Image (cartoon, helix red, strand yellow):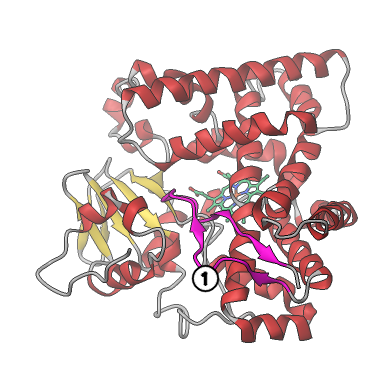
């Protein structure tokens, strides 16, 4: 059970982060409120990293090119060549994740993002609308046949997974394998203090994933199709645009992004609406608010709670100096509840305007899939409310997954009428 942080003596914030998944995942918001008010920029000495929670600071850190993602770019120039290699156990994982645009800086980041960005513009995404709606309708049919369907397993998870698998061109029948792979990567992304055994297990999974995609790329080489793998392969074959490792890493990033995030948006959305019956009734009466409701869910229960950046120079914020090479964890979930930015931030209001939340980050790494996630979320809410307006939670206690990075439910059993 989460305990209210003591007002004094000074609480042990480091311990809260250490035990986050056990103590805080049910309700992190009192903790965030404490950080926002008392420790908006806090240095955790034992781990050697900063925690930033205020909207203004978080936004500034993500937008300022002086904060980078690649460790070597955070070092002084004369040390950049000498950056220590990652421990051998982590090498397979690093080979895969290290080639993600998410962890690269310009110019590599710009090149990698540029190769796929056209597929995720609002205009391209809009064309997928009928298809996403048909998938959502089909999944809702499946829910209607069940006594007490689990929203996550029957709807929120398969919807984005089917969409991204189709876009990429990976076979639907391999879905169960993707699920295990992507949840393993989700755990890797969570943090650095994992034991050696975990590194070895994750390494095996990384090699398995890379092998799977290498095979798929070989198939597309002999028989190209109209999918993203074939498109990326064409870029790879043009020469110096994309290495094979980058090609595979990009496919995996898109697959994982499609697995670990939008599912949380849909699940958190239904849960939050059920916990705020007046807002649920408002949406039923005004279905045209679905897009705005999705923005408020993104703010109120952000599917990605935090990310990080490295200072490439000594950087001053609010009278404190983040030293060159130090890491800052930026708390998106806390920034989205900052009273300096949002009026009555703990109020869930599906008509909130303006609502400039940071759920998709900001700056050069702003979520590439945001238009797709928004569309999927809006269609999901619309279809669910049309089909099951009487739906209710079958269980009062939400089953939050114990992951500090991604905020989402393991299951959400519903009664449909
Ligand atoms: C509700 C759903 C989603 C949320 C909340 C979300 C959130 C985020 C956040 C916070 C970042 C930036 C992380 C950072 O800067 O460290 C990000 C980046 C990214 N997201 Fe999403 N995401 C969602 C869905 C998706 C989907 C569906 C896709 C594509 C299939 C996607 C693809 C990406 C990619 C490729 C990046 C890296 C962009 C870059 O580095 O330039 N995301 N996302």
Q: Is residue 197 above or below residue 379?
A: above
| Residue 40 image position (x, y, % from top left) | 28, 67
**Image coordinates for residue 399, horizontal then vertical, percent:** 50, 57
Tally of numbered discs: 1
How packed mark 1 is, by other alpha carbons closer than 10 Å (few <14, some 14-19, many 20 or more), is: many
Q: Quadrant of residue 112?
A: top right
What type of secondary structure mainly makes up the magenta span?
loop
- Magenta span includes 39: no
Quarter assignment of residue 195 = top left
Is residue 196 left or right of 250 when viewed as pictured? left
**For the view shown, which residue lies furthest in the front direction?**
147
Q: Nearer the viewer, residue 96 or 31?
A: 31
In reply to whether residue 407 is colored magenta, the answer given is: yes
* Residue shown at the point (12%, 67%) measured from the top left: 10
Q: Judge by depth and name the residue closer to the eye, 42 or 8.
A: 8
Where residue 310 appears, as percent x and y from the top left, is 35, 44
Span highlighted in magenta in the image? 391-415
Q: Residue at x 65, y 53 (%)?
A: 152
Please name whichever residue, 101 or 31, is drawn nearer the observer in this view of the structure: 31
Left or right placement of residue 219 versus residue 401 in this view: right
Question: Looking at the figure, which quarter contains the C terminus?
Answer: bottom right
- Residue at 32% of width from left, 50% of height from top? 328
From this view, report whether residue 378 is shown above or below residue 225.
below
Please give the residue where the numbered disc 1 appears in the rendered image.
Answer: 300
* Circle 1 SS class: helix
Q: Residue at x 45, y 60 (%)?
A: 332
> Does the image show residue 107?
no
If the image is split into quadrants, where does the N terminus sit? bottom left
């Amino acid at each position: 059970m989460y305990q209210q942080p003591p007002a004094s003596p000074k609480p042990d914030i480091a311990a809260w982060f250490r035990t986050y998944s056990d103590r805080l995942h049910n309700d992190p918001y009192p903790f965030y409120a404490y950080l926002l008010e008392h420790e908006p920029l806090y240095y955790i000495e034992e781990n050697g990293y900063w925690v930033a929670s205020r909207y203004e600071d978080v936004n500034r850190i993500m937008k300022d090119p002086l904060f980078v993602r690649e460790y070597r770019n955070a070092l002084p120039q004369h040390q950049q060549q000498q950056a220590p290699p990652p421990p051998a156990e982590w090498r397979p994982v690093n080979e895969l994740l290290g080639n993600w645009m998410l962890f690269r800086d310009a110019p590599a980041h710009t090149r990698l993002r540029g190769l796929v960005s056209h597929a995720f513009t609002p205009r391209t995404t809009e064309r997928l609308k009928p298809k996403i709606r048909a998938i959502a309708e089909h999944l809702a049919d499946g829910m209607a046949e069940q006594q007490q369907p689990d929203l996550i397993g029957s709807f929120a998870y398969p919807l984005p997974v089917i969409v991204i698998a189709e876009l990429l061109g990976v076979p639907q029948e391999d879905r169960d394998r993707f699920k295990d792979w992507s949840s393993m990567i989700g755990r890797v992304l969570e943090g650095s203090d994992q034991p050696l055994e975990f590194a070895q297990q994750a390494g095996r999974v990384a090699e398995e994933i890379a092998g799977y995609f290498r095979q798929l790329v070989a198939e597309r080489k002999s028989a190209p199709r109209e999918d993203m793998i074939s498109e990326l392969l064409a870029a790879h074959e043009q020469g110096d645009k994309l290495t094979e490792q980058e090609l595979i890493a990009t496919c995996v990033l898109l697959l994982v992004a499609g697995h670990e995030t939008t599912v949380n948006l849909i699940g958190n959305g239904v849960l939050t609406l059920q916990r705020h019956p007046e807002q649920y009734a408002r949406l039923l009466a005004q279905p045209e608010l679905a897009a705005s409701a999705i923005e408020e869910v993104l703010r109120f229960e952000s599917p990605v709670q935090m990310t990080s950046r490295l200072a490439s120079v000594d950087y001053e914020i609010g009278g404190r100096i983040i030293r060159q090479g130090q890491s800052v964890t930026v708390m998106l979930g806390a920034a989205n509840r900052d009273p300096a930015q949002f009026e009555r931030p703990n109020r869930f209001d599906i008509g909130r305007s303006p609502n400039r939340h940071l759920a998709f980050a900001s700056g050069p790494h702003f979520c590439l899939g945001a238009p797709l996630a928004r569309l999927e979320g809006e269609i999901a809410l619309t279809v669910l409310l049309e089909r099951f307006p009487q739906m209710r939670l079958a269980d009062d206690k939400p089953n939050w997954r114990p992951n500090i990075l991604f905020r989402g439910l393991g299951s959400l059993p519903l009664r449909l009428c």
